[in-house]
Image: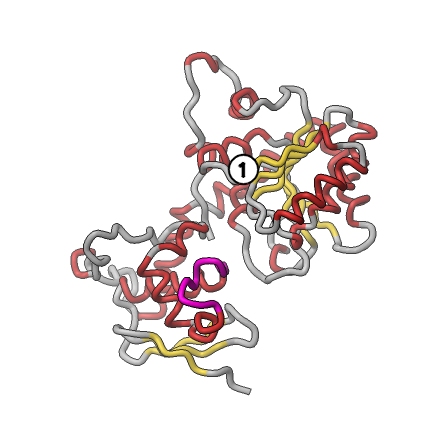
């Protein structure tokens, strides 16, 4: 998986920014203290992201680092959950050190990533998926803390800290954050390692190249183009269609072509969710499978009555992919 470079797509610097770093510019524009140690949590604010543990870790951190600040950037699906976290912050006496920024524009999202000293991306129970938010944090050159699950064990320890989802979670996380805050050289080394990992493994061009390699292997077409661009099917008139080399975004589920394909592949979920599905029941795994089928169709890589097995759900499902439709089969025993 690859993501766009947040340094490239953050709002441009102005003449007034002089020679400031991207982090300095971001902090000034968003009202963050230049000397604060900023910890960020990004994306949809859901209980699986362990925000209560993160608040407790920041409270421990603040005992040694008075400049500690937590920003939570993303929308809450449950208002009661947000209110509960605000109460917990008050109980921990760190309400003034926590900012809930809700959902922001993509440029501001990227800029706030750049403003952070560290990004925390916990997920438990794990939904066994890659996180575009995590990849964007790595692309921004930020040390990251993740839950110790197998899905993310390929990230180097030079910038990625793994914490177990148990009763030591907030203590261990606080210790890691404290180490970065008190040792700028260590933090800078982790930041460089994260950025180098992104440039070597996580760019959009690299993702595109890997997809093409897989398609060429599956179709046996070698280095030849899968299909001349002019022969690839075009989106319906009046719709530009989604890019193939993009990360999952909530707005994608409103794309008519993709929404129709998700309904075709997951009719059981559509039937249970109502006519607005996938709106209101957005699932990254639905997006991943539908985008894969869409790309294979567009690139002409599907033979008639092609079949595929997806592990986008549990148990795995088998689907038959056709040029004009997709049929889902029940899982085999």
Above-or-below relation of 295 to 59? below
Q: Give the residues drawn in magenta, as a range.
A: 273-284
Is 244 on the left or on the right of 100, as rendered? Answer: left
Q: Which residue is mark 1?
A: 195
Q: Residue at x 58, y 42 (%)?
A: 42
Q: Residue at x 49, y 35 (%)?
A: 110
Q: Is 109 inside the magenta-drawn segment?
A: no
Q: Which element is circle 1 on?
A: helix
The x and y percentages for residue 169 are: 78, 49
Above-or-below relation of 258 to 173? below
Please name whichever residue, 251 or 327, is drawn nearer the observer in this view of the structure: 251
Q: Quadrant of the C terminus?
A: bottom right
Please name whichever residue, 91 or 302, is drawn nearer the observer in this view of the structure: 91
Please, which residue is most extreme toward the bottom here? 333
Above-or-below relation of 30 to 136? above
Residue 172: name its quadrant: top right
Q: Main secondary structure of the magenta part?
A: loop
Colour scheme: secondary structure
């Amino acid at each position: 998986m690859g993501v766009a470079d947040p340094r490239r797509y953050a709002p441009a610097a102005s003449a007034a920014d002089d020679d400031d770093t991207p982090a300095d510019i971001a902090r000034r524009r968003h009202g963050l203290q230049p000397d604060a140690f900023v910890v960020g949590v990004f994306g949809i604010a859901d209980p699986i992201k362990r925000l209560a543990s993160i608040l407790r870790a920041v409270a421990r951190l603040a005992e040694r680092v008075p400049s500690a600040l937590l920003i939570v950037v993303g929308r809450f699906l449950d208002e009661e959950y947000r209110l509960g976290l605000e109460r917990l912050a008050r109980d921990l006496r760190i309400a003034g050190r926590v900012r809930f920024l809700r959902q922001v524009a993509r440029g501001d999202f990227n800029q706030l990533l750049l403003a952070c000293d560290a990004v925390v991306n916990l997920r438990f129970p794990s939904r066994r998926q890659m996180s575009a938010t995590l990849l964007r944090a790595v692309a921004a050159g930020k040390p990251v803390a993740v839950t110790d699950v197998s899905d993310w064990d390929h990230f180097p320890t030079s910038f990625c800290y793994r914490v177990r989802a148990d009763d030591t979670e907030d203590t261990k996380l606080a210790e890691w954050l404290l180490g970065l805050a008190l040792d700028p050289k260590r933090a800078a080394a982790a930041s460089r390692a994260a950025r180098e990992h992104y440039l070597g493994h996580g760019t959009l061009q690299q993702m595109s190249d890997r997809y093409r390699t897989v398609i060429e292997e599956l179709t046996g077409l070698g280095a030849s183009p899968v299909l001349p661009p002019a022969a690839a099917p075009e989106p319906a008139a009046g719709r530009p269609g989604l890019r193939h080399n993009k990360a999952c975004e909530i707005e994608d589920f409103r794309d008519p072509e993709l929404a129709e394909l998700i309904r075709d592949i997951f009719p059981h979920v559509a039937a249970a969710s109502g006519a607005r599905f996938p709106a209101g029941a957005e699932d990254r795994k639905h997006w991943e499978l539908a985008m894969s089928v869409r790309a294979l169709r567009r690139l002409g890589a599907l033979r008639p009555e092609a079949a595929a097995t997806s592990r986008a759900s549990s148990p795995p499902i088998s689907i038959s992919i056709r040029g004009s439709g997709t049929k889902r089969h029940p899982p085999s025993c």
